């Protein structure tokens, strides 16, 4: 099709759209109408929804990509290096994953490997207290946003109902029923939207909490295994069987 034919076709579409009544009830029109009917509190809840999405996305990316480290193969390599007496190489291996809490904790223990069990235990404990809280950071915000969005929706509902009942005194009696039904319907948009945000927040909270809990437990378990491993190493138990028992 030539450029001139495309232009003529576009003009025909535009002219037809201008002379034909715009279809009502489309998805976009319905969504826009839904928010307009709900009043100002709907837009307040949009801000809370945007905040919840931002937190959920940031935490998901952080936990699944920045902090994620396959603990099994990683600790297997650490164990082999420690068994071979290459503690420095094990420390460098931890540096390959600088954002991982597990790597940071293991590195803290390895840097104190030759200073005795007490120093290793202190280093691991300090590193756990420093790095583990970052795993669950901001996840609790989702629960708070869920509650705030629900309450904002209820406030918007009450606000809309108050406005509706105030307006009933200025309309004819035969229109009051229709106006009341419309006002209640519009006011309930706030409740629906607030509850929808709450459901989204709670689902994201459950998923992220479970994931962060597993990651925290993994860090703590591997820290304990590393402490036992280094303790056996310092005690002179350097056989492969001893290290397998420790890990």
Image: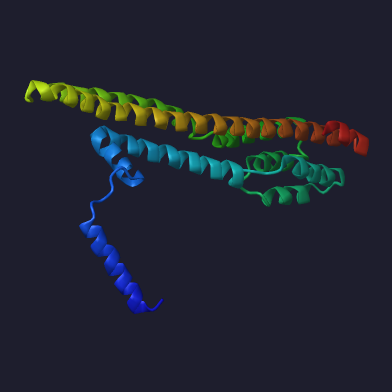
Residue 152 visible from this viewpoint: no
Q: Nearer the viewer, residue 211 or 194?
A: 194
Residue 22 visible from this viewpoint: yes
Residue 24, image x, y percentages: 28, 45
The answer to whether 232 appears left or right of 68 in the picture is right
Residue at 54% over, 29% down: 206
Q: Nearer the viewer, residue 41 or 228?
A: 41
Is 9 drawn above or below residue 225 in the view shown? below
Is 10 drawn above or below residue 56 in the view shown? below
Q: How is the image coloured?
A: rainbow
Residue 125, image x, y percentages: 65, 31
Residue 39, image x, y percentages: 23, 34
Q: Nearer the viewer, residue 147 or 172?
A: 172
Residue at 36% over, 36% down: 48
The answer to whether 62 appears left or right of 179 in the picture is right
- In the rendered image, the quadrant that contains the C terminus is top right
- Which quadrant of the view contains residue 11? bottom left
Residue at 17% over, 26% down: 179
Residue 146, image x, y percentages: 41, 28
- Which quadrant of the view contains residue 191? top left
Residue at 51% over, 31% down: 203
- How many numbered tags mark residues here? 0
Q: Nearer the viewer, residue 72 or 110?
A: 72
- In the rendered image, the quadrant that contains the N terminus is bottom left
Is 217 drawn above or below residue 63 in the view shown? above
The answer to whether 112 appears left or right of 12 in the picture is right
């Amino acid at each position: 099709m030539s450029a001139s034919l495309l232009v003529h076709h576009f003009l025909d579409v535009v002219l037809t759209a201008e002379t034909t009544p715009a279809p009502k009830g489309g998805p976009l029109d319905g969504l826009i109408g839904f928010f307009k009917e709900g009043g100002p509190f709907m837009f307040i809840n949009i801000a809370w929804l945007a905040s919840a999405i931002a937190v959920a996305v940031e935490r998901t990316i952080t936990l699944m990509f920045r902090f994620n480290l396959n603990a099994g193969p990683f600790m297997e390599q650490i164990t082999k290096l420690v068994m071979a007496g290459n503690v420095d190489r094990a420390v460098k291996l931890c540096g390959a994953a600088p954002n991982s809490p597990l790597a940071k904790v293991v590195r803290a223990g390895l840097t104190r490997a030759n200073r005795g069990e007490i120093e290793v235990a202190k280093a691991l404990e300090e590193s756990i207290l420093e790095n583990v809280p970052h795993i669950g950071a901001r996840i609790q915000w989702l629960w708070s946003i869920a509650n705030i969005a629900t309450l904002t929706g209820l406030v918007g509902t009450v606000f809309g109902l108050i406005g509706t009942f105030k307006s009933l005194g200025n309309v004819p009696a035969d229109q009051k029923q229709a106006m009341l039904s419309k006002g209640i319907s519009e006011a309930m948009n706030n409740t629906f939207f607030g509850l929808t945000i709450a459901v989204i927040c709670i689902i994201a909270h459950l998923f992220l909490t479970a994931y962060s809990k597993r990651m925290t437990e993994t860090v703590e378990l591997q820290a304990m295994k590393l402490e036992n491993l280094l303790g056996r190493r310092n005690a002179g138990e350097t056989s492969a069987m001893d290290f397998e028992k420790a890990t």
